[in-house]
């Protein structure tokens, strides 16, 4: 298969975010020949339909373009109050608006890291119906729930837990296998 591109979207703005580090680990563990770019949601304003109607801001258009151009998307979500953090939901809401809704048919893999014991199980479950309603093709298995992330990431920000690394590697393999073959031009 020719070179593939995954866009990784961490759903946190925090410096030192575990989920940003998970996205970096995805870049390290992706199959050979696959590049992983990491998005930053910092410049997205809060969704406002009036702003959208007047013309989406450049940061929104840029994110939509990057999702559209990616062969697949990897989302690393935190969990806030048993749900999807507003930063990430806001990004999905902005990019869901027509024209050029980029999620339709897009292979998507979910993962998430938290400092608690549930490893974003609930946030990931909440994301699935949202992505399904956009016709994204979300990988079902393996599920990657990084609980107690502070014990699995070292001081240099490297994911050190071998079981988690193996799961992430497998998830990315499955994600790449869901990308339709590119036809020669
Ligand atoms: C949290 N956190 C959290 N963790 C969890 O496992 N379940 C939860 O429901 C919540 N709720 C929650 C609400 C709010 C407002 C904050 C700020 C935090 C803790 C959260 O998992 C932890 O802060 C992670 O480190 C956030 O991800 P990043 O920023 O490290 O990627």
Image (cartoon, rainbow, N blue to C red):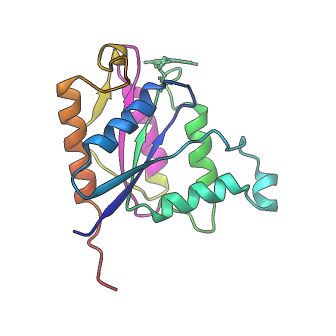
**In the image, what residue occupies the spot 21% across and 54% down?**
32
Camera-nearest residue between 125 and 102: 102
Q: Position of residue 10 (x, y in %)?
A: 48, 37
Quarter of the figure that contains the C terminus: bottom left
Queried whether the magenta region covers residue 126, the answer comes back as: yes
Camera-nearest residue between 130 and 163: 163
Q: Quadrant of residue 100?
A: bottom right
For the image, the number of numbered tags is 0
Queried whether the magenta region covers residue 29, the answer comes back as: no
Quarter of the figure that contains the N terminus: bottom left
**In the image, what residue occupies the spot 53% across and 31% down?**
12
Q: Residue furthest bottom?
A: 185
Q: Position of residue 80 (x, y in %)?
A: 52, 23
Q: Is residue 171 above or below residue 50?
A: above
**In the image, what residue occupies the spot 23% across and 28% down?**
164
Q: Is residue 12 above or below residue 7?
A: above
**In the image, what residue occupies the spot 39% across and 35% down?**
125
Q: Is residue 33 left or right of residue 130?
A: left
Q: Position of residue 141 (x, y in %)?
A: 23, 42
Write the start and end of the magenta stretch as one range: 104-131
Q: Is residue 119 visible?
A: yes
Q: Quadrant of residue 26?
A: top left
């Amino acid at each position: 298969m020719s070179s593939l591109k995954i866009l990784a979207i961490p759903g946190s703005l925090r410096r030192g975010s575990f989920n940003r580090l998970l996205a970096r680990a995805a870049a390290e563990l992706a199959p050979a020949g696959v590049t992983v770019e990491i998005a930053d949601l910092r410049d997205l304003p809060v969704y406002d339909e009036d702003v959208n109607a007047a013309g989406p801001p450049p940061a929104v258009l840029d994110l939509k373009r990057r999702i559209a151009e990616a062969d697949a998307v990897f989302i690393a979500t935190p969990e806030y109050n048993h749900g999807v953090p507003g930063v990430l939901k806001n990004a999905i809401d902005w990019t869901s608006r027509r024209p050029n809704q980029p999620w339709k048919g897009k292979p998507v893999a979910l993962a998430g890291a938290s400092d608690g014991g549930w490893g974003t199980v609930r946030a990931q479950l909440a994301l699935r119906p949202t992505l399904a309603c956009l016709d994204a093709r979300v990988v079902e298995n393996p599920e990657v729930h990084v609980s107690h992330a502070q014990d699995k990431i070292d001081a240099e920000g490297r994911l050190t837990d071998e079981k988690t690394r193996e799961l992430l590697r497998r998830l990315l393999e499955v994600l790449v296998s869901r990308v339709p073959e590119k036809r020669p031009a």
